[in-house]
Amino acid sequence: MIMGTTLSYNASAAYRALKESRSEEVEQRLLAARDEVLADVTLLRSQQPIPAEKEPLDAGFIDLPRRLLDDDARSTSASLLRQIDTVSATLRDALDRVVVLGIGGSYMGARALFEALCHPYHNELNRDARDGVPRISFAGNNLDNDALHGLLELLQRGGSDPSDVRHRWGLVVISKSGGTLETAVAFRIVQRALEKFYGPQSEEVRQSVVPITGDEGKLHDLAAAKAYDHVFPIPDNVGGRFSVFTPVGLLPAALLGLDVRQLLRGASDMTEQFIKAPPGENPVLDYTAACHLLETRHGRSIRVLSTWGSRLEALGFWYDQLLSESLGKDERGATPITVVNTRDLHSRGQQHQEGCLDKLITNVIVESPSYDPIRLPTSLDDQDQLNRLAGKSYPEFLAAAVEGTNQAYADANRPTADIVLPRLDEYSLGQLLQMLMLATVLEGRLIGTNPYGQPGVEAYKNNMATILEQH
């Protein structure tokens, strides 16, 4: 049963701009692709051999939210969510900063949740203002010497007394295999700094490092050798860019005090809607149909995710990876771009308005702000001539910007669509993340591209390893 799904998707403006209509033929193909996506889950859970043409098959994310919630409802203390509750509460009480090491899907989902749902200046607040929730820093996602140096300097200057919680920090390291160089190199270096702070063989180190990894591999072996107190699994049948509802995303979210169950309920309800709802009432089917039609019939091969407000920029970056790695194969696949408006109306907006006719712009709009609206005051000095707008709120200014921009695009026959969230909360974010993952997999099955695996990324890793070993 769908529990009050509130996310909505509307592509009517896009169809109108291009004098296009919903295609019954495409909808029938979409329903067949949906059947294939759901059959993939059944095949995965059957434990039968996976046919070669389906390899890899990382469809475990699709029913994972519901499985986690059901297991949690049945269990008293053994469920994964209860374990995450316990460990995150322990770390929140013990640490004032957590460094999350990971690259790609190993950190981008957690970063998206952090930026969307936490205080916009979370790390600048003191511990009391954060309600004891630790600051969070992301690293291990680049080979930037100066960025890592700055982090180490920050950690060193943060304090020297391991007995004072305001000085204490820890690590969450995320890598399925442990072999990704960016994360592995950063982990060795930052781990050394942590051991210097607490003492190399101290119990504090074993308690303050949490690996999230596969059942085998380099990080799994290192975690066993170091005897870390807490190690969380990444399921074999969930790929990195689909892993936000595994401990990869859930543990950082819980550390930040977010409601991981509401996050999972949003995702589970979106999956239920994907399975049962017909075209026209199904955000996953409708989004995929619009994207596919506009790309194949009208050449809109660039998909602009236009986030109205800076708190969703990291979600856009997460989606950039999801779409690129999933469908950018066999000389096919749309190109994703993330913009933040109204900021980027003063840069990319010109190109979107009058440039190449190759874009579908999807607005992500949040109807209600998380905080009380700020209103423009009246001033005795009206040289800026803003008194005519006095009393209007920031949400009113933003709504006018959205409407005005969409009208300008419509007047120029530039296609736009809207994803509307009632507010930024865990339930809505769970819906949106799952919607975009399901839509990406659905489109892959629709066009005959395996949406799982990333062979192009593996090529650069192999080349880099060879070059380093030769010099």
Image (cartoon, rainbow, N blue to C red):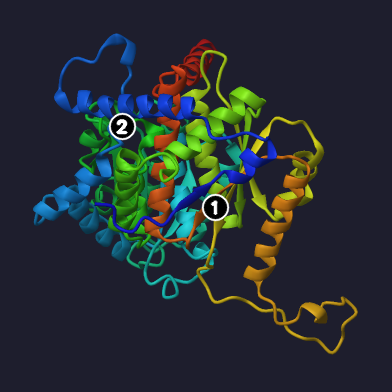
Q: Does residue 128 appear left or right of residue 296 in this picture?
A: left
Q: Amino acid at mark 1?
A: Leu
Q: Amino acid at mark 2?
A: Val
The residue sitting at the bottom extreme is 380
Q: In the rendered structure, are the residues bearing label 2 and label 1 in contact, judged by CB atoms less than 8 Å apart?
A: no
List x then y, in percent, for residue 246. Answer: 30, 42
Mark 2 or 1, nearer chain start: 2
* Secondary structure found at label 1: helix
Disc 2 target residue: 238
Residue at x 62%, y 38% (from the top left corner): 15
* Secondary structure found at label 2: loop
Marks 2/1: CA distance? 24 Å
Total labels drawn: 2
Disc 1 target residue: 312
Compared to 313, does 450 lie above or below? Answer: above
Q: Does residue 76 appear left or right of residue 131 in this picture?
A: left
The quadrant the C terminus occupies is: top right
Residue 265 in sight in this render: yes
> What is the quadrant of residue 259 in the picture?
bottom left
List x then y, in percent, for residue 50. Answer: 23, 15
Residue closer to the observer: 156 or 441: 441
Residue 101 in sight in this render: no
List x then y, in percent, for residue 20. Answer: 62, 33
Q: Residues within 10 Å of mark 2 (few under 14, many from 20)?
A: many
Q: Does residue 49 appear left or right of residue 144 in this picture?
A: left
Residue at x 50%, y 31% (from the top left corner): 323
> What is the quadrant of residue 242 in the picture?
top left
List x then y, in percent, for residue 220. Answer: 25, 32
